[in-house]
Structures are given as C-alpha cells and as structure tokens.
Image (tube, rainbow, N blue to C red):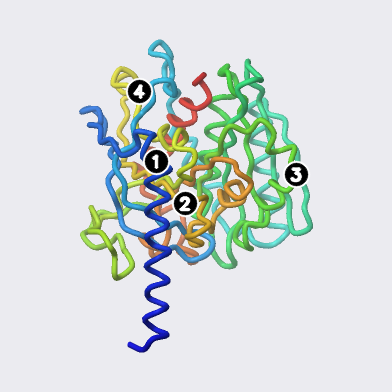
Amino acid sequence: MGSREWGFVMKRLFWLALVVLLVVVALGGSGFWLRQNPPLSTPHSQLPIPNSQFPTPHSQLPIPHSQLPTPHSQLPTPNSQLPKVSFDKLFGHVQKLSGQRYTDDERLRTRNYITSELKKLGWKTQLEKFPEGVNIFAEREGSDKTVGSILISAHYDTVFNSPGADDNATGVAVTLEVARLFASRPTPRTLRLVFFDKEEAGLLGSKAFVANKIHLENLYGVINMDMVGFACYIKGCQKHPAGLPVTPPSDKGDFLVAVGDAENLHLLSAFTGVPKSQQKVNSLDLPLVFTLPVPLKGSLIPDTLRSDHAPFWLQGIGAVFVTDTANLRSPHYHQNSDKPATIDRKFFVGAAQIVVNATTSLLESQ
C-alpha cells in the first residue's frame, strides 16, 4: 500500500471516528442507549442490524443501536382504543391499484382512484401540480392547533413494466386505511395525507412538496411508507452487503424497518410498542420492528437519502421511513412479477397496524 492509499484509508478512518463521536454526543444524554425490556405480550423488539445499501430510490443505511425507550407521553391514554386495520380493505386497495402506474394516463387513473376513495371517506383533496407530475394532498384539522400536524405519505407511481403491488400499492393502501380510521376520530394534532408522484424518477414529488414552505409550517413529523408487504422466512432470504462491521441478527426477512433521523427520536419511539391492555383489545399480531436512527440527517451517509423522507430531513423536518427492505429481501423489486399474489398477507396487515399504532401515538400525544 503506497502513501496515497494509506492517506486515503486514514482519511476514511477519521470521518468514521467523527461520525461515531457525533452520534455519542447527540444521543448520550437522551437515554437512547439505555436498554429496556419490551412488553412480554408484544413481538416488537429493536435489535442492531447491519448497514444495508438499497439501490435508488429505496435505500437506507442502518446503524447498530440499543432499544429505543417508549415515552409514555406519546402513547394514547389507557381509555382510548387503538383503531384496528381491515385486511380486506387493505388488500382490496392493492388489487385495484396493481398495474403499471408509469405513463401520464396510468397515473391519472391512479389519482382518480385515490381521490375517489378519499371523497367516500369525507376527505377533501387538493391536486398539487409540479412540472413532472401531480401530488395528492388532504388534511383533517386537529382540536389543538398549537401542537402541530402529522403527515402520512406514500408514492403512487411505478417504474416501467412493473405492476407495483408492493412498490408501492402497499404504502398507498396503508395511507388510505389511515384516512378511513381517522376520518372521524378526533385528535389533538392535525392529520395530513400526501400521495407523491414521480418518486421513481428521483423523489420529484416530495422535492416539489417541501419546496412549498407552507407545507412545512407547524409540521411535527412525517411517516413515509415505501414497500411494506413482502416477507420471506427461509434462512438466507434476507440479504446483506459483504464486509459488515456487525453480525446480522437474522437472515430471514420477517421484520419491518423504520429509519429515522437521530435528531427526532420521539418519532422513532412511536414504533416501539403499545400498552399491553391495548394489545389485548386489538388482538395484535405484529412483525418485529427494527428502528434505525441516522445521525446528522444523513449528510455523511448519502445512501440514507434515497426515498421520500429525505427532502423532509434536508428541510429540518423529522421523518420516519417504513419499509420491508425492498430488493434486499424481495426478488420482485422493480420487476413485472411484483403482483398482489406475492404479498405476504399476515406481514402486510401487521405492518399496517404498526403504522396505525404509531400514527395514533403521535396524533394523540400532547
């Protein structure tokens, strides 16, 4: 190894040490590193998993970490029952949405379906045009305008020649289910819904959305979903890049991943569980959730900036990206085989319930 190569290695080690130091400083005083035992009745756990690189635009680089604490202030009151998702409605949306959503006409038909479903539920929608496409926006005001709003989002377009059942009809379906469950449920925080266009072309819809600063006013946090319906249970079906600095906890693709910016741990904490009493009421059967904090809004780890949460991070807005890990698990990623028949029904409904639980926590916390 020559002097130039040695200098390059030393520079990489310097930046790695700097990232570790900044993470420790940012999280050391927050209680983040304190391990807590999860409730015995819930399968939720947050274990360290290795760095995982996703091809554009579905990519996140997880960081090994301890379990997140669950602040009681972010959970619904003991007397409030968590809304429960309907698999029939979820899968019905996936079936109706499945089909290439790439051309202008295809995406127009998709917008018509989404807006029609929202109208049935009593939501008023706004079509927000940008040069390359059209986003769909809807809002239901909360009872306390001083506590901000929660935004739930998913992209509705596909790549060429893919039906996009998992990518991303599943995310759209869960967003529509959130719309149904909270259409008439009063909450302190305002609920906003956005269906992004042209995510597959480079996050164009979400970039256009955050460029309008009105959308960012009084925004408490974002939950963005992109592929939440595929699971695999054969040893070795969950892939990881070579040269990992930590040992993967599992090589089965049976867990959901929530990636968030380390500056907004309160958003990730909403994914760590719900009270035992509410689990009994709702008979929850949920997959594992791995929450992955990313420091400095991904500025030193560019691979964490490749989905619709990224434009919010770069505007200083906390956001969580929820995914089934895309091509690291699914052989149908961006293929013409991404059809409703490949969706794991139990995993999908469990993932949807996890998102609804987190949404409830964030909307009803004070």
Question: Residue 81 shows which numbered tag?
Answer: none
- Of pointers 3 and 2, the one earlier in the residue sequence: 3
Q: Residue placed at 25% from the left, 32% from the top?
A: 36
Contact between labelled residues 1 and 4, with CB atoms less than 8 Å apart:
no
Residue marked by disc 3: 212
Q: Residue placed at 37% from the left, 62% from the top?
A: 328
Residue 333 vs residue 72, the one in the foreground: 72
Instruction: Give amino acid for label 2.
Output: Met
Residue marked by disc 1: 27
Alpha-carbon span between mark 2 and mark 1: 29 Å
The answer to whether residue 145 is above or below residue 210 is above
Q: Nearer the viewer, mark 4 or mark 3?
A: 3
Left or right of 257? Residue 38 is left
Label 2 crowd (10 A; few <14 / some 14-19 / many >=20): many
- Of pointers 2 and 1, the one earlier in the residue sequence: 1
Q: Residue placed at 36% from the left, 28% from the top?
A: 70
Instruction: Give amino acid for label 3.
Output: Asn
Instruction: Give amino acid for label 1.
Output: Leu
Label 3 crowd (10 A; few <14 / some 14-19 / many >=20): few
- Of pointers 4 and 2, the one earlier in the residue sequence: 2
Residue marked by disc 2: 227
Alpha-carbon span between mark 3 and mark 1: 31 Å
- Of pointers 4 and 3, the one earlier in the residue sequence: 3
Instruction: Give amino acid for label 4.
Output: Asn
Q: Secondary structure at mark 3?
A: loop
